Amino acid sequence: MDRIKEVYNRKESTKSSSIGENIRTARKRKGLNQKELADKLGRTKNVISNWERGDNQPDVEMIARLCSILDVTPNWLLSWNTEPETIDTIAAHNSGITLTQEEQEKVREFAKFLKSQRKG
């Protein structure tokens, strides 16, 4: 959760692209309408609409839940990645294995480490 807060706080200061646009894109990719997403999050359709329009932003805890439901990473949702990096993409060869949110973050961090080693 601390890593998500760190990324979220950096995103707050840069405002380089819209979290709302990414929520909309991921929601549609999952085949959900605003009400269906709102129901899964225990929020109202208006809350989702406000996020997608950029009138408000989800808090850090809600970002974690959004990522889990929409199967995207916090980095992508907060526009730190340009491609939707799903857990399925990261662990494509581990079908049938369910990872906790903490384990998923460790997989992402390890993947980043491996990628950084290739550049050097």
Image (cartoon, rainbow, N blue to C red):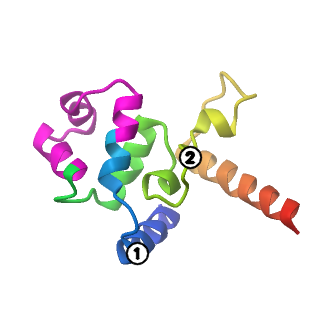
Answer with left or right where residue 67 lies relative to residue 104: left
Residue positioned 47% across, 60% down in the render: 1
Q: Secondary structure at mark 2?
A: loop
Residue at coordinates 42% horizontally, 36% vertically from top-left?
70
Q: 10 Å neighbourhood of mark 1: few (<14), some, or many (≥20)?
A: few
Does 42 appear above or below 51?
Answer: above
Q: At 66% from the left edge and 27% from the top edge, which residue is drawn?
A: 97
Kindly report the distance in space between the C-alpha atoms of the residues bearing marks 1 and 2.
19 Å
SS majority, magenta: helix
Q: Residues within 10 Å of mark 2 (few under 14, many from 20)?
A: few
Task: Establish if 91 lies above or below 1.
Answer: above
User: Given the current orientation, which residue lies at the most extreme bottom position?
Assistant: 13
Front residue of 9 and 101 = 9
Residue to which mark 1 is pinned: 14
Image quarter of residue 25: top left
For the point 49% across and 42% down, which residue is it?
72
Q: Earlier in the sequence, mark 1 or mark 2?
A: 1
Q: Position of residue 74 (x, y in %)?
A: 48, 54
Give the number of marks. 2
If the image is split into quadrants, where does the C terminus sit? bottom right
Residue type (three-letter) at the residue carrying disc 1: Thr
- The numbered disc on residue 83 is 2
Q: SS of the residue at dot 1?
A: helix
Q: Is residue 42 left or right of residue 114?
A: left
Q: Per the image, is 39 magenta? A: yes
Could you say which quadrant of the image residue 109 lies in? bottom right
Q: Label 2 amino acid?
A: Glu
Relative to 96, is 87 above or below?
Answer: below
Image: magenta residue range: 25-52
Q: Are marks 1 and 2 in contact (CB under 8 Å)?
A: no
Assess whether residue 28 is covered by the magenta stretch.
yes
